[in-house]
Amino acid sequence: MANMSINLVLYHGSLLPHELVPSQLRLSRTRVLATNRALQVCTERWSCSASSFCCYCFHFKGCSCRWKRLVRSCFTTESVIASDENYGNKQVVSLTPRLYDYILKNVREPKILRQLREETASMRGSQMQVSPEQAQLLAMLVQTLGAERCIEVGVYTGYSSLAIALVLPESGYLAACERDAESLEVAKKYYHLAGVSHKVDVKQGLAAESLEFLIMNGEAGSYDFAFIDADKRMTPKYFELLLQLVRVGGLIVIDNVLWHGKVADPLVNDSKTISIRNFNQQLMEDKRVSISMVPIGDGITICRKNRLIF
C-alpha cells in the first residue's frame, strides 16, 4: 500500500455521533497522524504511507479497521459510502468543484435562461436562484408528464418558472406566485423576451392566499405539476394546499430539502432547519404521495400524488 495517492475531503462543520475522531488524530504543519498511518501534505494531493493500521476514514482493501468509512478517495474524484454496513459497499459520487463544473458544461441551457442567470447573479439574494441542472430537471419532469397546468410557489427572478414555461405547450398555463415586486419585474421582463408571457399568470402577494383563492375558484385537482421554492417554514402549508390543487398522478417538487447539509447535523437547530427536517420526516410517513429525494442543487424531493383507496 506504499505511495498510494489519494485526495482528501475536509468537512467544515460538526461530525455526527458515529463519526468521532480518534484521539490520535492531530494536525501539524506538515502531516496528519491517525492511528499509525501518516498522511503527507502536498500542494494538490495527499500521499499516503501505509503501516499495519488504517486511518479512521479511509478503508483500504484488507483493512480490519472498525471505524465507519466516510469517504473513499479515488484519484481525481471522491465518493461516499453509507455508515450503515447493511447498505454494502456501494460508492456514491461526491460532488467536487471540478465535477460540478463538468456537470454544468453538460447542461443544455437556453440562451435566454443564461442571460437571466447572469443578470440575477449581480442581484441581492442571487443564491435563491435554482441551479441550471435543477431547472433542466424541472423542465424534463414537466415534459415527461405532458403537463399543461403548473404552479410555482416562490418565483424570485423567474429562472425556474421560465424554464418550465419554455417547455409548456402554447396553450399551457403557469401560476407564478411571488410577493417581491422588484424581483418579479425581472421575471416579467424575461417572460416577455422569451415570448412566454401568455403562458404565465403572475400572482403577486402571499402565496398561501393565492393558492387558497385557486381552490375556492374551483381549480382543485386541475394542475399537473407544482414547484415549491419559498419560505421554508411555510413549506408544510404550501404542500397541503398544493395536494388539493394537483391531480392524482401529478407531481409536487420541493426545493432545499437538504438545506446545505444542515438537516443531517444534530447541532444545527435553527427554526428553518428544524422545519425542513420535520417536513422531510413527515413526507417519509405520508402515504398520499410517493417520494424520491434527489441530491441535486440543495436537494429536491419529487412527490407523486397517489390515489388513496380506503
Image (cartoon, grey):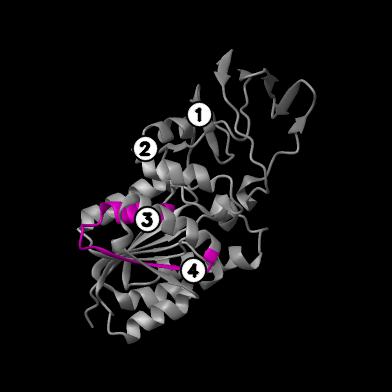
Q: Horizontally, is 224 left or right of 102 in the view?
A: left
SS at badge 1:
helix
Q: Which mark is residue 191?
A: 3
Assess whether mark 1 and mark 2 are in contact (beta carbons under 8 angstroms).
Answer: no
Q: Is residue 157 magenta?
A: yes
Q: Secondary structure at mark 2?
A: loop
Q: Earlier in the sequence, mark 3 or mark 4?
A: 3
Q: Is residue 66 visible?
A: yes
Q: Which residue is mark 4?
A: 279
Q: Residue at x 49, y 37 (%)?
A: 95
Residue where numbered disc 1 is placed: 98
Q: Looking at the picture, how far across and down is residue 42, in whole percent?
A: 67, 17
User: In the rendered structure, which segment of residues is drawn in magenta?
Assistant: 156-181
Instruction: Point out the tag, 1 or 3, that comes first from the N-terminus.
Output: 1
Q: Amino acid at mark 3?
A: Tyr
Count of marks overlaid on the render: 4
Mark 1–mark 3 distance (CA, rounded to whole Å): 33 Å
Q: Residue pushed farthest right? A: 29
Viewer-nearest residue: 78 or 257: 257
**Tag 2 residue:** 107
Q: Amino acid at mark 2?
A: Val
Q: Earlier in the sequence, mark 4 or mark 1?
A: 1
